[in-house]
Amino acid sequence: MLRFSLDQYLRDHGLTAYRLVKETEGKVARGSIFAMARGDSVKRIDMENLNHVVAALSALTGEQVSVTDLFTGRPEPVSLRQSAAGVPYTDDEETNDVLNDHPDILDRFEKFKSRNRVTT
């Protein structure tokens, strides 16, 4: 699971949320910084605020900080919904209906193609 981990970044670099608040004063609301620093409470991140946080962290650490430095974990894999024919749904509703109504359609199509191949 992907997690915004500003709290961990601050701990790892000997910084506090309060110090980050002071560095971003006038750019990011105090409450926003403290909410981001709480960790698990972050559900959405404002891109402008994130940009100011990354810039402030770069200034405070003297290192080039990347947005990826503030995340831990990996996104959970997503599996696409499968049609009855065993392939992912398409953007075309009519095709999806055919794939669901005739689950063997792809096998039938392959057989048709192999019967009608021109050999040279």
Image (tube, rainbow, N blue to C red):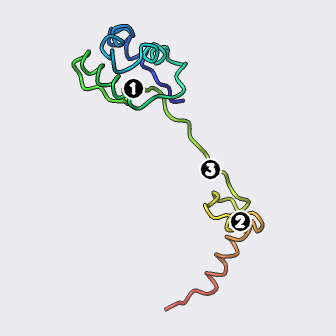
Instruction: Tell me, yes or no, whether the two marked residues, 1 and 3, touch with CB atoms within 8 Å.
Output: no
Q: In this view, does 82 lie above or below 94?
A: above
Q: Is residue 19 above or below residue 57?
A: above
- Residue occupying the point 62% across, 61% down: 90
Q: Report the residue that reaches farthest toward the front.
A: 26
Q: Tag on residue 99?
A: 2
In the displayed structure image, the side of residue 89 where residue 62 appears, left or right: left
Density class for disc 2 (Cα within 10 Å; few <14, some 14-19, many ≥20) is many
Q: Name the residue under label 1.
A: 49
Q: Is residue 109 above or below residue 22?
A: below
Determine the secondary structure under disc 1: helix
> What's the residue type where badge 3 is placed?
Leu
Determine the secondary structure under disc 3: loop
Q: In this view of the protein, which residue sits in the foreground, 58 or 8?
A: 58
Q: Report the residue that reaches farthest toward the left.
A: 62
Give the number of marks.
Answer: 3
The image quadrant that residue 32 belongs to is top left
Q: Mark 3 points at which residue?
A: 80
Q: Where is residue 44 in the image (x, y as percent from the top left)?
A: 51, 28
Mark positioned earlier in the residue sequence (1 or 2): 1
> What's the residue type where badge 1 is placed?
Asn
Q: Could you give the CA–CA distance between mark 2 and mark 3, rounded to whole angstroms? A: 15 Å
Q: Where is residue 11 in the image (x, y as percent from the top left)?
A: 38, 10
Q: In this view of the protein, which residue sits in the foreground, 114 or 19?
A: 19
Q: Where is residue 65 in the image (x, y as percent from the top left)?
A: 29, 25
Q: In this view of the protein, which residue sits in the foreground, 109 or 44?
A: 44
> Can you say which quadrant of the picture contains the N terminus?
top right
Density class for disc 3 (Cα within 10 Å; few <14, some 14-19, many ≥20) is few
In the displayed structure image, the side of residue 63 where residue 77 appears, left or right: right
Q: Is residue 54 above or below residue 76?
A: above
- Residue occupying the point 29% across, 20% down: 56
Mark positioned earlier in the residue sequence (2 or 3): 3
